[in-house]
Image: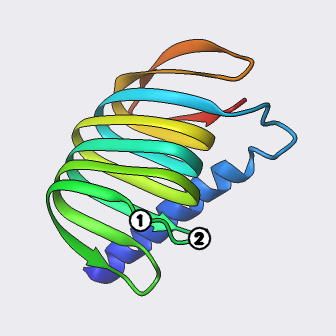
Amino acid sequence: MWKKIFVFVLALALVTLSAAAGVSADSVAGKGWIEAEGNGRACMTGNADAVTISGNGVLWYFDGGEEDTPVVTGEGFRQEFASGWVRWKGFDGEFSLTDADEIIVCLRGKDVQLRAEGTGVVTLTGRGHYETGGEGVPETTGRWTLAGVSIPLGR
């Protein structure tokens, strides 16, 4: 069972990182922001000036850059893995982080709210809505879908 979960998380990380690889320094015009609400999965991959995610479900976090310490409030069982991933099962609260490089943070569950500023990619899968914008980028709105949508920040 744990092997299946680890393989799923590893595959999720690889898919998310490959989506982020498509956003190169050449295509990023500046920093962007997003606000999203819905039910399903919300992930941010990249460099965050600020990221806050809240809701009920399972939260995953990985810090590939310098070690940043998130502020986590609410309930949930925290588990650290040798790979560097941290998981909160039964998460019901808020996760926030500022000035963090090379992070991945995902929450799968209900009543998910994500607010992020920085550069990278946000992937939303499920049902919900979002609004995004940034430096030199017009504000746009959209909907989460079951097939998933990827929104580059700062393009």
Secondary structure beneath label 1: loop
The type of residue carrying mark 2 is Glu
Where 37 sits versus 46, above or below? above
Of all residues shown, which one is farthest toward the right?
26
The type of residue carrying mark 1 is Thr
For the point 87% across and 41% down, the residue is 26
Q: Mark 2 highlights which residue?
A: 66
Direction from residue 105 to residue 136 in the image, left or right = right
Direction from residue 151 to residue 91 in the image, left or right = left
Name the colouring of the figure. rainbow
Residue 6 seen from this side: yes
Count of numbered marks: 2
Direction from residue 29 to residue 95 in the image, left or right = left
- Looking at the picture, tell me which residue is in the foreground, 53 or 143: 53
Quadrant that contains the N terminus: bottom left
For the point 55% across and 29% down, the residue is 33
Q: Mark 1 highlights which residue?
A: 69
- Looking at the picture, tell me which residue is in the foreground, 153 or 18: 153
Relative image position of residue 140 (x, y in whole percent):
56, 13
Crowding near pointer 2: few (<14 within 10 Å), some, many (20+)? few
Crowding near pointer 1: few (<14 within 10 Å), some, many (20+)? few
Where 6 sits versus 108, above or below? below
Relative image position of residue 139 (x, y in whole percent):
59, 13
Where 113 sits versus 7, above or below? above
Distance from disc 2 to disc 1, alpha carbons, whole Å, reads 10 Å
- Looking at the picture, tell me which residue is in the foreground, 55 or 11: 55
Residue 101: which quarter of the image? bottom right
Residue 147 seen from this side: no
For the point 46% across and 78% down, the residue is 84
Badge 2 vs badge 1, beta-carbon distance below 8 Å? no
For the point 66% across and 56% down, the residue is 18
